[in-house]
Amino acid sequence: MKRETKIIGQSVLISQLKQLALQVAETDITVLIIGETGSGKEVLARYIHAKSLRADKSFIPVNCGAIPAGILESELFGHEKGAFTGAVQSRKGYFESADRGTIFLDEIGEMPLETQVKFLRVIETGEFQRVGSSETIYSDARIIAATNKNMYQAVAEKNFREDLFYRLRSVELQIPPLRERGKDILLLAENFVHEFERKHKIVFEGFSPEAGEMLMRYPWPGNVRELRNLIESLLVLEKGTFITPEILEKHLVQRNRYKSLVHDPSKSEKNELQIIYSSIIQLRQEISDVRQLLQHIIQTRPHVPLLLPDTSAISGPVSTSMSRVAEENNVSHEAEVLHSLDDIEKKSIADALEICDGNKRKTAKALGITERTLYRKIKSYGL
Ligand SMILES: Nc1ncnc2c1ncn2[C@@H]1O[C@H](COP(=O)(O)OP(=O)(O)OP(=O)(O)O)[C@@H](O)[C@H]1O
Ligand SMILES: [Mg+2]
């Protein structure tokens, strides 16, 4: 059965992403897709394949996180008969099967280090050997990889090869989380309603305007997949009846226990605070990831040109960007970057303190740090 390759969405972020996807589809360049769970990474990969000259060849999805580490290599590169216990026949790997088509390596951050070495060679030359064979095979597979992991952290912790990471992100496409796509939420909901009306032979009476607003306000931690699942269960369990905020809330709460975030406008101030807190925590994590990576590079490779992470790593997962190479790795440049990271951290702490009315315990909790660390930072930033 042919899979859906349509990307539903008219928001600026999604329109820009589609535009970039069309541009890269015309080439064979390696693409790294970054996005939260359920945000549509596979949909985007299929879209790129469908719009490319390889569209009539295979699209092979491989979930690197779901295949046990011990057999991933033989799955990817194939094996010869007798290469290991149980290899009763020789077998083609996914790279061979994807020849002239596209291989989609999902959860690339989960790829074991030994496999990463072999994979880097495939990206660079297209060459590899089946497990148990010394014959070199060539595959012209276009590579699209995806991750929902913080790859800077994986690189800093040495769980992912730095050279492979930079090679993979020749082009990096960031999928925005659903909560940042505005009216696309309703557009997607409408499409899913049509899909499930047909599938379950149900006539849906619609959402009240307040229920529609609730859909727009909800933070969608499971992104588009969560919205799709919600619409299907709403239609089936409520038998197509008109959806009020009360009914919708019942379903959302049952799924995620996000009661305080989706209901009761009197709590909207609290909701805003929670969103601000989580943004600060996220920002802090990103700053610390970038800092760790920079320190690692400074310590281990003092004379090598520095590949600076995009500013998107600091400003959040919204932007879509191509990788850039910074000019020279001189100490003043690094000091400048570290200095501006300090400024961001200082401002995050100052903002959090203000939101929490100076209450240190609450501020530390909101920032996800210990009170002792908070006191230390307040002192060192002179707050
Ligand atoms: N823009 C979109 N238009 C239509 N359907 C979408 C869109 N984005 C995602 N979906 C649907 O949402 C579901 C999740 O999408 P997909 O599997 O591509 O997400 P993912 O980011 O790969 O998730 P995971 O992190 O779990 O691997 C699928 O059913 C997909 O069809
Ligand atoms: Mg996926």
Image: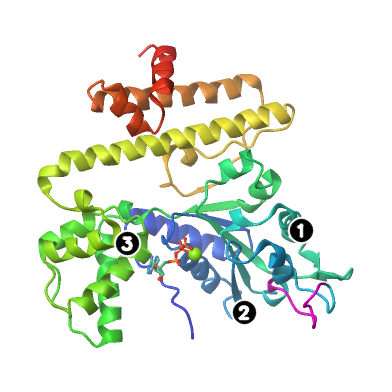
The residue to which callout 2 is attached is: 57
The amino acid pointed to by label 1 is Lys
The chief SS type of the magenta part is loop
Residue lying at the far right in this picture: please name it: 134
The image quarter containing residue 38 is: bottom left
The residue to which callout 1 is attached is: 118
The residue to which callout 3 is attached is: 10
Front residue (pair 43, 320): 43
Q: Is residue 328 visible?
A: no
Residue 45: x percent and y percent?
52, 66
Front residue (pair 82, 38): 82
Q: Is residue 321 visible?
A: yes
334, above or below 315, in the image: above
Region rendered in magenta: 84-94
Of marks 2 and 1, the one in the foreground: 1
Task: Please say whether residue 211 is one of the residues in the magenta stretch.
Answer: no
- Local crowd at mark 3 within 10 Å, few (<14), some, or many (≥20)? some
Is disc 3 placed on a helix, strand or loop? loop
Q: Ligand 1 within 8 A of label 3's CB?
A: no
Ligand 1 falls in quadrant: bottom left
Residue 358: x percent and y percent?
26, 20
Is disc 2 placed on a helix, strand or loop? loop
- Local crowd at mark 2 within 10 Å, few (<14), some, or many (≥20)? some
